[in-house]
Image (tube, rainbow, N blue to C red):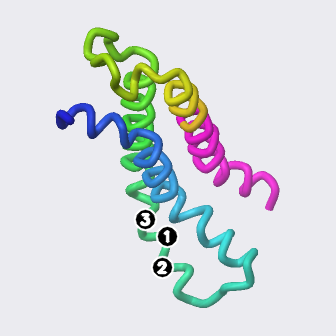
Amino acid sequence: MRLSDRLTSYGPAGAILSAVLASLCCVVPFALVMLGISGAWIGNLRVFEPYRPIFILIAIGFLSAGFYRVYRKPAERCEPGGICTIPQAKRWNKVILWMATFFVVFILILPYLISILA
């Protein structure tokens, strides 16, 4: 598998991870308090706030790579008998990608929703 194929095949997972990192400053402290976990150390998670735009861009990049891989990948690169010829695999790739997209969007707008609801 080529490097570009490996990078784009990790699109949904990378997007989710970077979205969680982007919300580390805002959503994670709220979630920990809701779970009953508290302490002065939770305030230290605010140090990640300046990096939030970087993680958002990384999440968008991973999602873009995933969408390119699923929807725009040239068909001539698909070898006969490969996994890209199986209709169920194509369908699962789309389902997982869209689930990851909705999760990432939810995680990214959650800090704004928390500020409205709190």
Circles 1 and 2: CB atoms closer than 8 Å: yes
- The quadrant of the picture occupied by the N terminus is top left
Which residues make up the magenta segment? 97-118
Q: Position of residue 108 (x, y in %)?
A: 58, 46
Residue 72's image quarter?
top left
Disc 3 to disc 1, how far (Cα)? 5 Å
- Horizontally, is 7 left or right of 50 in the view? left
Indicate yes or no whether the magenta region holds residue 111: yes
Q: Residue at x 62, y 39 (%)?
A: 99
Residue type for callout 1 = Arg
Q: Main secondary structure of the magenta part?
A: helix
Label 2: element kind: helix
Q: Residue at x 68, y 70 (%)?
A: 31
Residue 9's image quarter?
top left
Q: Residue at x 50, y 25 (%)?
A: 90
Indicate yes or no whether the magenta region holds residue 105: yes
